[in-house]
Amino acid sequence: MRKRSKRSERLNFGWGRQIRYAMCQAVHSFYGWYDHFGTRRTHGYRIRIFARFCLRQGIHDARLITQSTLDLYGEYLRDRLQGQYVWPDDTIDRKISVAYAHNLISTANTALYAIRGNSKIELSALEALAASRRHIRDEPAQADLEAVTLASQQMVVKGDGRGAAVTLLARHWGMRAQEATLQDLQRMQREIAASGGASILEGCKGGREDPGRWIPATPKRIAALEFALNARPIGSRCMLNKSESVKIFYQRELNRCRRVLRSLGIPSYRELRAGFAADVYQAVTGVPPMKGFVVPRDLDKKARLEVARVLGHRREQVSSGYVGGYR
């Protein structure tokens, strides 16, 4: 009987015949087939860029990818920072942002680590691009309360009441979409009754459960929570029913709701968090961010620390991505 070859000696390290498919399979296995759905999905989108680049270099097997290949990929992305990139066959790749280029390199590093099982081939985004990411918002949040209310009403009419609840929780409590989906709503209700506010604990990024992320209840926040409690499935503490996963809920309902948000000028759920951050900043300083008002430096710092706390970051500099830089 013929002995089975080792994985490292097989095409694409044994992950599949097509290089893009193989990288995606390796990344799924690396993160866990039933965990980190959003992360795996995002890497899957970006892997296609790296896989297509490899194919254009004549590389159809991940075993043939070298440090030189990765360095060329960095040069290709650096060229796209300046403008459109034209391939020899006249195919045009559009200009990209510095942040997206950093993300593409991060995905390439992750995919190679997952498929190879080591980090012998790796690319520094900062060195390859000669540019760092800029996480400073330069325009006010596009999350007007009237637009949010209208969006939630449209979602309810279309039968997406749970999506409307996620929208309202994101806007009034500053939750990420996953946090709003998995939050224990009954616990929040009990905490509000006991202390006048509630903590955001379930579904947090990186599994961080920080009791310090306590948010005082206001009439609008209470109304959003009551709406979510009424919209949740019977017998459930959160937005999911017992037989449903976050992935299925995103695919069946939240993706439809994203289109409703965009139709009303709200780019994403993250933009709803930016609107919440602006409210928090204004509550501390008395003026909205990025509207030309001069705020004393110490008061601005206090507001940014509060924004970082309620959003679950705990780092003042992260607030600039939501309320802009100090002016």
Image (tube, helix red, strand yellow):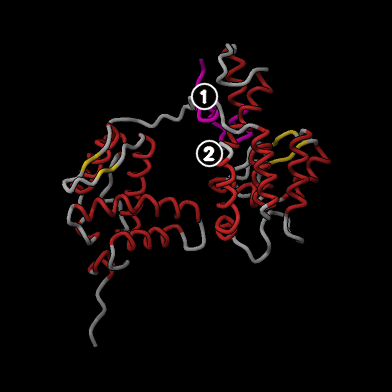
Q: Which mark is residue 276?
A: none
Circle 1 — which element? loop
Could you say which is closer to the camera, residue 16 or residue 260?
Answer: 260
Q: Which mark is residue 324?
A: 1
* Residue 220 falls within the magenta-colored stretch: no
SS assignment for the magenta stretch, majority: helix
Q: Quadrant of residue 298?
A: top right
The residue tagged 2 is 267
Residue at (20, 45) in percent of width and height: 90
Q: Is residue 197 left or right of residue 211?
A: right
Amino acid found under the numbered disc labelled 1: Gly
Which residues are the magenta region? 306-327
Amino acid found under the numbered disc labelled 2: Pro
* Residue 317 falls within the magenta-colored stretch: yes
Q: Residues within 10 Å of mark 2 (few under 14, many from 20)?
A: some
Q: Is residue 134 left or right of residue 264?
A: left
Circle 2 — which element? loop
